[in-house]
Image: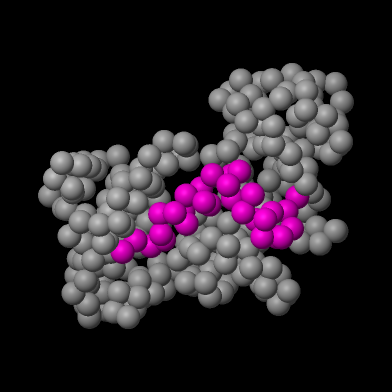
Amino acid sequence: MSTTHGKKVGVIGRQDGWSSRRLADAFEKRTGHYCLIEMDSLVFDLERGEVRHGETKLNELDALVVKKIGAAYSPDLLDRMEILRFLRRRGVTIFSEPESMIKAMDRISCTVTLRLGEIPIPPTVITEDVSEAVEAIERFGKAVLKPIYTSKARGMVVVEAGNGVRKSVDEFQGNGNPIIYIQKMVPLPGRDLGLVFLGGEYVGTYARVGSGGSWNTTTHSGGKYQPHDPSDELIDLAHRAQELFSLAFTCVDVAETPDGPVVFEVSAFGGFRGLLEARGIDAAELYADYVLRQLEA
């Protein structure tokens, strides 16, 4: 592909990240400019009012596209988001808006936004009181304890009602989870779905199909991507969910249960691999085209 744009677009991501490199490559094809930026290598000089990555001054870029803001989810990422918020206020166009990403990164914020938006979610209880957490698990029968910041089900613990519940909750809280996020474990048909949106428009859906060796369907636990064609009603549900966050690119995690569909989360960054492996859709190419169109508008 010949370069057709003179824009300089930086990709916030990881040098060892497949999706990050793929997105940076897509921009290089179109602009002749390759720029992959790792947040832990930034210098934020408040006196000079600039943010620098090596010799690159982010203030001078036409746009930044955030693919991955750190190697692992943690509250520290919110501090990195403040740097992006500064750049946005100084006129740098950022995909997605920092405030939109922050709202989706924190599991509690994401859950509250979905609930206030009347999006169906699994029964959920959030507390710092161990006794209240135990009561909720006993009521649910089987539940998943989820860290506030995580991805691919890392750090999640399945707990069943009965003896040993309090010990499990104590251990979960002691492992760096002062706020106990408890979600009832809903029956899944061996899969959950990722519905992808770009600029608020539906792109496609992939299924994560479990390996049978784990309670969750993530690829981290052996799950595989497969194509899936959801109903119009499911697409509409996911569309309403992502609309609450105003993200440039996102994936809505949906599960079909006997009691109807539920939304687990709306991703702050979204993934590329599921669409590519399941549907042959290169989301990095689509995203780069979308960003450049927005810059020319």
Identified at 47% across, 57% down, the residue is: 100
Identified at 30% across, 50% down, the residue is: 86
Instruction: Point out residue 287 in the picture as x, y percentages from the top left corner.
Output: 40, 70
Identified at 20% across, 56% down, the residue is: 59
Q: Main secondary structure of the magenta part?
A: helix
Is residue 192 in view from this perspective? no
Location of the N terminus (image quadrant): bottom left
Depicted 268 relative to depicted 126: above or below: below
Instruction: Point out residue 114 in the picture as x, y percentages from the top left corner.
Output: 65, 56
Specify whether 197 is left or right of 20. Answer: right
Is residue 1 in view from this perspective? yes
Depicted 169 relative to depicted 90: above or below: above
Who is closer to the viewer here, 46 or 249? 46
Specify whether 37 is left or right of 161. Answer: left
Q: Residue 25 lies in what quarter of the image?
A: bottom left
Magenta span contains residue 117: yes
Magenta range: 93-122
Specify whether 11 is left or right of 262. Answer: left
Instruction: Point out residue 82 in the picture as x, y percentages from the top left corner.
Output: 35, 45
Q: Residue 243 lies in what quarter of the image?
A: bottom right
Q: Residue 289 lies in what quarter of the image?
A: bottom left
